[in-house]
Amino acid sequence: MKYEIRIEDGLDDGWTAWFDGMHITNEPDGVTVITGQVADQAALHGLLAKVRDLGLELLVHAAHQRRASIALPKERAMTPIIASEGLDHALAIETRQLTKTYPGGVEAVKGIDLAVPPGEVFGLLGPNGAGKSTTVGMLTTTIAPTSGRGRVAGFDVATHPIAARRASAVVFQEPVVDRGLTGRRNLDVHARLWGLDAAGAQKRIAAVVEPFGLGEVIDRPVDSYSGGQRRRLEIARALISEPQVLFLDEPTVGLDPRFRFELLDLIAGLRAQGGMTILLTTHYLDEAEQLCDRVAIVHHGRIVALDSPAALLAHMGRDLVELRLAGDVSSAVSSLRAQGLAGDDTFAVGATLHIPLHDRPAGETVATITDLGLGLTAITSRAPTLDDVYLQLTGESLAA
Amino acid sequence: MTTVTSTVTLDTSTVVRPRPRTGGLAAVATLARRRLAISARTPRELLIPLLAPLLFALVVVPALADTFGTSIGGVDYMTFVAVATIGLLVPLSTIQSGLGVVVDRLGGGLRDLLAAPVSRPSIVAGNLVVAVALASLQVAVLLGAAAVRGAEYDLSATGVMWFAAATLGFAVAMYGAAEVLANRLPTQEEYIAALPAVAIVPFFFAGSFFPISALPAGLTVIGKLLPITHVLALVRYGLADRNGAGLHDIWGMSNTTAMAALSLGVVALFAVALMAAAVRTFQRTAVR
């Protein structure tokens, strides 16, 4: 059975060697055509899988026949050539039971499942040590998973790490730019590593420098940058390759409030442009609330809640009454429950009791509780935040 | 003729645009440019390392020649020691290059490279290219300055090839050792502390200032096992000693070309083994 495969990228000599025995022509329009013969459709699948294994995206244009033919639609992107059992190829990021145990037995990630569709801004929310950065590390192939699977832009990070890295970019929590080099050189190195030629790199550098406010400093050594400028450079650098998936690992940590808000605006701008999938890790709840379509709350290496910020907040009711107690918290909860003031979702963190209010008016509830004589040192009511969601899920729960 | 419609399931919900890819050589070239830019950002950073070969060629070696000035195996002592200084400069230069790997690891640059769509061995290869280039520059300056100061070379095309092959193999081997140490040792301090054992001590057992036959018998055996001994014998054979006295001290054979080939084989073996170890160590330690 004769086949014809078209690849939009030209193949250079280093790659054509792999296709030994097949006929390869580089056409003037930059398309490479590979033709040859295979025994049957299964063999063609195997061939395509191998091509895919090299990290090439294929455009299967047509196939010809001698005795039979494979008629494949023209100009269709073939992302999911290699079957990954149980994983959905349409997702931009997907993990199944992704686990990481560091040497010494520290279980950083304990079986995380994620399914992030293209174009979504997805937040991993949790405190330091929750496993967020380790998850990003595994998806960017800088940390080896202990078990489980992950795919980025359709590529399995274990079996096709280079293709997964090519389709993505990452801004790490810690600064990783070469400080001795100029901003422009840093951008250029990144562009070239992601496969852009010299002209393409310059074009992309020009495209990101001004929007990120780096025009005046781009030819200065990064040593001389402020923290905010360096962070902007790192994000600009990640965008040089126009990644399908962008990982932002605690992008605002350590920045002063002004730079932090600048960066949040930048990330919001990326979100507004659409098209790019962003996985953002943060322990700032306002960031997650402001930027993310959906948020996974991570605690001790596990996802304890996953939904849109609005849906997560909805579980907390319209208002939250916060009581600081001088006496025994458990007996106070018993009294409140007996009065019908506290539900099963009431929770305590230390000596502070949190009562989500779903129907009852906040003012009336505060007045009633104050009159109970529970030994309060303070009582307030306010709108719930993701912080409360997190505390309820991970703190000391009285509802249990 | 039968026409069969494919049952290949194509998912078009995610339209992935074909992306340019970074070929192996292109990646190494980019990584080498990065390493060079970091290692030699200014002319001063490039020139200061050249002071060592200049000092050796213009001051130390002539002083040694004045003090111990006889010829060894028909090679004047000035040339004998000047050429041998390669055995000190190359390890020092490559170990210095390896320090960049430690800095990359501790400073975060390595993690960034690990996230790039290039093969992991190409990261090592990019560093290797620059390390060898900088070592070669030092060797060229050493030999040029030594010639100015009076070293006498007996050059032939074949001899230069023996010299070049031996020096290249030695630089690769020493960089391999540097990369292994840089990935194994947790701090810059520990890395620097390892420098004398790797780069300096072997120099004294390799026939640098005197033939290895002048060493006590036990140390001669040790000297023969060191790649640097074979390198020095080869570079002297290639540049100054067509009789191959150093090679004869090692192999004791009559066919000089055969002895040179054997010594070059030893150097190549060390180069391949140490680079393989370097790549393996990098891959095992870089990704946790």
Image (cartoon, helix red, strand yellow):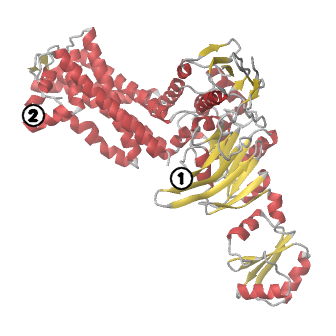
The residue nearer to you, when weighing A214 against B21, is B21
Camera sees residue A329: yes
Question: What residue does disc 2 label?
Answer: B215
Quadrant where the C terminus of chain A is found in the figure: bottom right
Quadrant of the rendered image containing residue A304: bottom right
Indicate which disc residue A146 carries: 1
On the image, the x and y values in percent for residue B143 come to 27, 19
- The amino acid on which the numbered mark 1 sits, given as a three-letter code, is Thr
Q: For marks 2 and 1, give the CA distance.
A: 53 Å
- Mark 1, Cα crowd under 10 Å, few <14 / some 14-19 / many 20+, is some
Residue A69 located left or right of residue A17: right
Camera sees residue B116: no
Q: Does mark 1 fall on the same chain as mark 2?
A: no
Badges 2 and 1: C-beta atoms under 8 Å apart?
A: no
Q: Secondary structure at mark 1?
A: loop
The residue nearer to you, when weighing B263 against A255, is B263
Residue B170 located left or right of residue A315: left
- Mark 2, Cα crowd under 10 Å, few <14 / some 14-19 / many 20+, is some
